Image: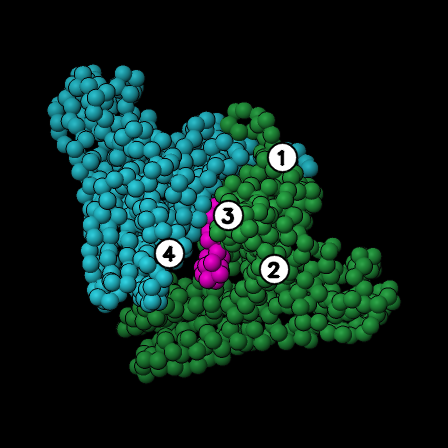
Chain colours: A green, B cyan
């Protein structure tokens, strides 16, 4: 089992970008459409998203969030109400200019994000402090007409969720911004087995129109960074622009404080690049569309198919997403196929196993075979899935820890960036000038100022002025 | 409890259209956006849709259907590939002409429906008969730039699902078209408590590009018809146009046979107009966001709030969607509020009830009060919800039966249409000319040729020629 089973996938070490594209295409996650940069989410790729949605949506609801659906189209005048916001998004909007046979009086943007629509709606429905907080979310697609594209990582149209909340006080809104970042962080770690670094974005990297942007940053297998989710605090700036106000307890008109937060199908790109290997996809069990696949061996022999079907029934009844592949492809073909598709647990069942009342479990991660009693199958599969989750998390954490470097001089930073990759941890004066210099000369962007700060030194390694923050740098997707 | 509790809703008898709009707005189902004909789905309205989605999606999956997500945008050249299809939809498309700062070389339509996109994708991914059938579905929004609009019934943007399947043979595809119509019909009757008439659309009324369209038609409280769901059989026409083909068992290139089928948030309009009354919304229990609301009476008295909270816990744990309203609004205000919102079961709990170990259940439909033991609460609420579902279904069925008329002359048809409303059941020769005449002179459109046919007479009442089908006519939303 040491050899590369799936020959059609480029090796990660040879060409990571090509490996990634191969996996997306050959594991049938995605297809290209006739519009450049717009992708089709195929059943297997979409099923991963459905599992992400189901689990995250339940977490949102625990936080008192309700789902809504806002319009797809934003009148240009509405988008322009908030200056920073429109500057950030207008250049990459797709514009509708004709409705039916008539030319529209005003252009409509297909939503790149919906702060403006939520604000307009909040202004309509908010009256009294009694109605606060309002915590809304929507699952939808958005369009950003960017030049370059890549499956899951950069689509002109992508699926996401966007949460928008308004609160009576700044304190409550700030706290909720952090709460939602932590919901994302816990989800990434506990469900996707992706370790995250939690922190705050610099002024340069924050969301257009936000007062503060919090982020979770993950390290991919190739040591590049992926921004996996963000949560924004807006203060009352948008509310003022959009006349969102309420009567407070003292009967005074007041503007509420806002937040917004989102994750997208980019998370699937993160899963692929965190856990995948040269045989293809490796899926964390909690979001795998197929958690266990049963492969009958010598299926023509008496009783094997029946036993496989019974096993399928037992596992399915226990809530384990199981498939039994009874197609006439060879067992070897099937092994390779489900390896490539990243199914966490393979179950082999042949006539001799059956006689002995057992079957063979194979872990997608370690490839270890384990012979287990059929009567214990649910416990055994559950246990191996837990092991897989933990192994994936530990492996990703190790990768991050081994490739997070501390630097105290700009020379060191450049050296690490050009020879090692990964996260470079330094102090920073807080000036945009130094941030731009790191981008220009070391090719790294600021990732975040982690919530957990360390005092590496007193000075900014770029300019030598007194340091204000510890910060992470990296090359990002 | 006889008097009208919610004064702000127009009476149905006074102005049914205004009653409907009042309910949509005051029950907080919907809000207007700044684009005419585009509506916002508010939390309470969207929660109904989420319940519809959850139940229908599980039914689809039982039929082997997998979810996908196709692009929002359709290049004009792709939309034009099927002549009948483009003629039907192009006049009401919204067109994107600019992406970012660049004018597009070709216009893109925002999908009004996605047959063309699915066909293009099928052509890419289909190779062998072994891959058939492919049964795909997507939940999304579509845009149809129509002139008039009405909440839930006619939006320029609305939420729906569209299923698209391809099959190796015509027989299999035809059978699946009917299977999905029956899934819709059973859902309407068993979940939404809306009786349906199943049948086939005439050539005039069928979907653009389809060989046959099947429909379920419901009668609303005002006796108008609502087309609640449709299922289309395409033959291999689209497949030929889009070069969708597969190698069959004899190694011959063949075109598959297609179906598509959809329901939309129009179903919510149907629920409102089937079950609602002068106090507002009445929701079938299976899709009600709140199935039971607990209203503590004299809540300041010792133990009431604690007992209400315990009741909430008990019902929630049993899977009954329950809310406990502990706000400082009066009990009378709360009664009216949840009546208006159509919550099926109200639970009143006061100090004296508590002493007696009981509470009061009130049905939204009959308004009957029933005193029940707290220890039996789950069984009692479950039973009353079943009663409500059945009562709603029976009431709607009675309305339909009382307002379905048989006619054998054109005079009779016109008389019924102008004085009674409802469905008019006649024979029909099958000619477009007669169908148009009924529209022009009696103001009714053909609804469907029911699967269950009766032989009312031998001749078409409009032209006197031999009759081919029994058909239903009506005034439709």
Chain of the residue that carries numbered disc 3 in the rendered image: A
| Residue at the image point whose x is 26% and y is 65% from the top | B354
The Cα atoms of the two marked residues, 1 and 3, are separated by: 27 Å
How many numbered callouts? 4
Name the chain letter of the residue that bears numbered label 4: B
Furthest residue toward right: A464
Q: Which residue is mark 4?
A: B325
Asked if badge 2 and badge 1 are on a common chain, one would say yes
First in sequence, mark 2 or 1: give its number: 1
Identify the chain of the residue marked 2, using the numbered disc in the image. A
What residue is disc 1 on? Answer: A77
Q: Which residue is mark 3?
A: A128
Question: Can you give x and y, in whole percent of width and height, for residue A179 in the image?
Answer: 56, 63
Q: Is residue B299 visible?
A: yes
Q: Residue at x 54, y 76 (%)?
A: A391
> Which residue in the protein does label 2 denote?
A171
Position of the N terminus of chain B, as image quadrant, is top left
Label 1 marks a residue whose chain is: A
Mark 4 and mark 1 residues within 8 Å of each other at the beta carbon: no
Instruction: Quote the CA–CA distance across marks 2 and 3.
Output: 18 Å
The prevailing secondary structure element of the residues shown in magenta is helix
């Amino acid at each position: 089992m040491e050899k590369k089973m799936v020959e059609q996938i480029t090796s990660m070490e040879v060409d990571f970008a090509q490996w990634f594209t191969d996996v997306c295409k050959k594991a049938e996650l995605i297809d290209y459409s006739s519009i450049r940069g717009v992708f089709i989410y195929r059943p297997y790729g979409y099923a991963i998203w459905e599992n992400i949605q189901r689990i995250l949506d339940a977490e949102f609801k625990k936080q008192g969030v309700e789902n809504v659906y806002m319009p797809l189209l934003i009148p240009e005048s509405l988008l322009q109400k908030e200056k920073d916001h429109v500057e950030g998004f207008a250049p990459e909007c797709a514009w509708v200019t004709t409705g039916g046979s008539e030319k529209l009086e005003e252009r409509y943007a297909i939503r790149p994000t919906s702060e403006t629509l939520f604000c307009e709606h909040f202004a309509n429905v908010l009256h009294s402090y009694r109605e606060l907080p309002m915590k809304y979310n929507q699952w939808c697609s958005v369009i950003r007409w960017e030049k370059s594209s890549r499956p899951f990582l950069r689509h002109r149209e992508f699926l996401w969720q966007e949460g928008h909340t308004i609160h009576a006080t700044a304190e409550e809104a700030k706290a909720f911004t952090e709460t939602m970042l932590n919901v994302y962080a816990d989800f990434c770690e506990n469900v996707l087995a992706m370790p995250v670094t939690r922190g705050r974005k610099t002024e340069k990297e924050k969301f257009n129109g936000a007062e503060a942007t919090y982020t979770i940053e993950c390290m991919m297998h190739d040591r590049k960074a992926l921004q996996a989710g963000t949560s924004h605090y807006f203060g009352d700036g948008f509310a003022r622009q959009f006349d969102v106000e309420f009567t407070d307890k003292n009967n005074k008109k007041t503007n509420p404080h806002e937040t917004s937060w989102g994750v997208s199908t980019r998370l699937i790109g993160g899963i692929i690049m965190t856990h995948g290997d040269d045989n293809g996809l490796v899926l964390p069990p909690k979001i795998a569309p197929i958690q266990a696949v049963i492969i009958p061996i010598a299926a023509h022999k008496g009783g094997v198919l029946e036993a496989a079907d019974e096993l399928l029934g037992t596992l399915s009844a226990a809530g384990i997403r199981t498939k039994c592949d009874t197609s006439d492809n060879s067992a070897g073909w099937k092994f390779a196929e489900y390896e490539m598709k990243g199914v966490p647990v393979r179950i082999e069942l042949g006539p001799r196993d059956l006689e002995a009342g057992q079957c063979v479990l194979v872990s997608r991660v370690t490839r270890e075979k384990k012979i287990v009693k059929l009567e214990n199958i649910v416990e055994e599969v559950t246990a191996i899935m837990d092991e897989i989750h933990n192994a994936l998390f530990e492996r990703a954490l190790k990768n991050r820890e081994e490739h997070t470097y501390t630097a105290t001089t700009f020379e060191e930073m450049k050296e690490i960036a050009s020879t090692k990759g990964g996260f470079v941890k330094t102090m920073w004066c807080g000036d945009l000038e130094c941030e731009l210099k790191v981008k220009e000369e070391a090719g790294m962007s600021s990732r975040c100022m982690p919530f957990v700060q360390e005092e590496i030194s007193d000075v900014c390694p770029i300019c030598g002025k007194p340091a204000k923050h510890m910060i992470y740098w990296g090359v990002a997707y």
